[in-house]
Structure formats: C-alpha cells, structure tokens
Image (cartoon, rainbow, N blue to C red):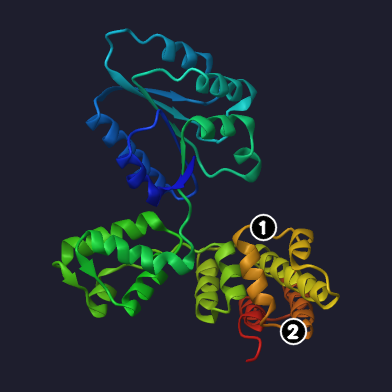
Amino acid sequence: MRINTEDLPQQLKRGLAKLYVVYGGEALLALEAADLLRKTAREAGYSERETYIFEPGFDSSTLLMGSRNQSLFASQKIVEIRIPTGKPGVEGANTLQRYCESLGEGVLTLILLPKLDRTTLASAWFAALDAVGVAVAANEIPRNQLPSWLSARLTRQKQQADANTLQFLSERVEGNLLAAHQELQKLALLFPEGQLSFDAVKDAVLDVARYDIFGLGEAMLSGDAARFARTLEGLRDEGEAPPLVLWSLTEEIRALLKLKVGQAQGRPTAQLLRDARVWGLRQGMIERGVKRVTQATLEAALSHAAQCDRIIKGVRRGDLWDELLALGMRIAVPNK
C-alpha cells in the first residue's frame, strides 16, 4: 500500500503494519515520517532496535540471519534497513524479497530509501516491499502548494498568517524545506500565538531559498515572471553554469514547439507528450504553457536561444544573463 507522509498519522491510528518503507526526495518529510514511526513503535513496546546499512562490502545475508535469531522471550524490536543509494544490488534485492516472505512476529521493519526513479519503483524487490507493508512517499512540495503547507505548519504552533505573508515566506524558503521548518520554529520562539504581521515576519525570516534549474523552467512555463526573474538571479548568484541554464530553457521551448506543431496537425496531446519525453508534473506545465504562446513566438524564442549560445561561445557580444532573462520572458509573458 502506498501513501504520502501526510496520510501516515491516520494510517498509524489503525494499527502498526509489520513493514514500512519511507522513500522520496524531501529530506524533512522523510525524517519526520521515520521519527513518527520509531516513536509509535516504542510506545507500542518495540524496545530494541537493529540497524542494517546496504553499503559496499555489506553482507545482506546477515539481515536474514538476524531476523531469524529472535528468542522466544525477546522483546519486540525495530529492524531498520537503510539503503542510501536506493540500489540494493542483485544480492540485496534477492535478500529483500526473501525477507518479505518471512516477516516475524514482534518485529517492525523500517526501510529508508532516497528518491527513487520510475525503474526502481517498478522493480520486483520494491514491489515485494509494497505488497507486504506500507510505502510512505516523502514527495517534494509543489511550489503552488507551499503557502498552504506553511499555513498548516503555522497552525500546529497556533499561529496564523495572511495570504501575502505566506507568499512572502514561500519565496524565501522555496526549494529548502528543512530551512523552512527552521524558520517556522524561529517564528514560534519570537512571537506569541495568534496572527503574525507581515512586517514582523519580513524582519525575522532570512532568505534561505535554494534555486534550481527545474524551478526556473517551471516558473517560465507557468507564466510567473517575477518568480522566473528571481530564480534566474538566484542561479546567477549561486554560480550556476550559463550553458546549463540555456540548455534547460531551450529544452522547454522545444517541447512547447513540438506540442504546438503536433496539435496543429491534429495529433493526440498524450502521444505528443510521450514523443517529447515529457513526464509527470511537467506534463501539466507544458500543456498549460502551450496555450499561452503562438508557434511564431516559440520559433522566435529558439532563434533567441541560438543568439545566447553565440554569446556563451564568444562569437557574439552581449550581457548573457540579461539575454537569458529576455528569453524566458518571451514565454512567461508572451504578449509583453
């Protein structure tokens, strides 16, 4: 059974399962989910804990031996299995599948994994874990859901903030949920329960946003010009390589153009997205973005991208970062 971290407390109210898998790219949510599982297990009488780490040189067969060597009079225990790479290897995968076939009484198994790709999620060993236990996904919080996530966290500490303040907070902590958690804890220490003013939050919260290439493309596709400019500036200040930034924007523009041309030819959108290798959340962004731009705009944007490439190679003069900003704005605000 697969659930999200936000569903875990409700699942635990129905009783502990024998096995839990916590995986995903959001470190804070994964950490909180694992801590909640350990706490719940301790309260249920699981007083011992064994840890196995799948790393180079680890003999995975010791996991099977340890699970079988429990005394009749031994206390309940937590078996924690950490696979830092998310790749247990052939032997490790076989061990995990065999382990799932003989889950003992009085043992709660907690398996910790990083963010997994589609292939790993479809693997036989992960399917075996999923079949006998609860797989808890610690997914990253989408940018448009961050204000509501922050609001819910403030509510836990009996504080509230209006929409403008939550938007300001989102901009300051975007892409850095661990830092967001720390900033919220700081607000709880600095201010009493109740409504937080914008000025108070602005003075207290540091700018801890962490910018990434994906966020830049997301801002451009969603038409959020302010976020695009802010993210581009952040990438420049963090020393991101200009060729990588240009490549990211160009890939999005090419995907939009492929979709635009294909739709004009009457081809199904789903097939066009597959052909353009657009998956997951990016599909919705591309579909919404293509509605705002014309084919002529996209063709002009590709020509502009070629000019940016010439600046990078020293063939053409110009301020590269200004040109990258102008390039993104062609798509973010095509009518301006």
Q: Position of residue 11 (x, y in %)?
A: 36, 43
Observer-nearest residue: 309 or 281? 281
Q: Is residue 230 above or below residue 130?
A: below
Q: Which of disc 1 and disc 2 is earlier in sequence?
A: 1
Any mark on residue 294, and which? Answer: 2
The 10 Å Cα crowd at callout 2, few under 14, some 14 to 19, many 20 or more, is some
Q: Residue furthest front?
A: 14
Residue shown at 36% from the left, 10% from the top: 70
Q: Position of residue 199 (x, y in %)?
A: 25, 79
Residue 267 visible from this viewpoint: yes
Any mark on residue 213, and which? Answer: none
Which amino acid type is marked by label 1? Trp
Residue shown at 37% from the left, 18% from the top: 105
Observer-nearest residue: 43 or 201? 43
Residue 59 visible from this viewpoint: no
**Label 1, on which residue?**
279
Q: In this view, does 131 lie above or below 95?
A: below
Residue 138 in the figure: left or right of residue 203: right
Observer-nearest residue: 267 or 24? 267
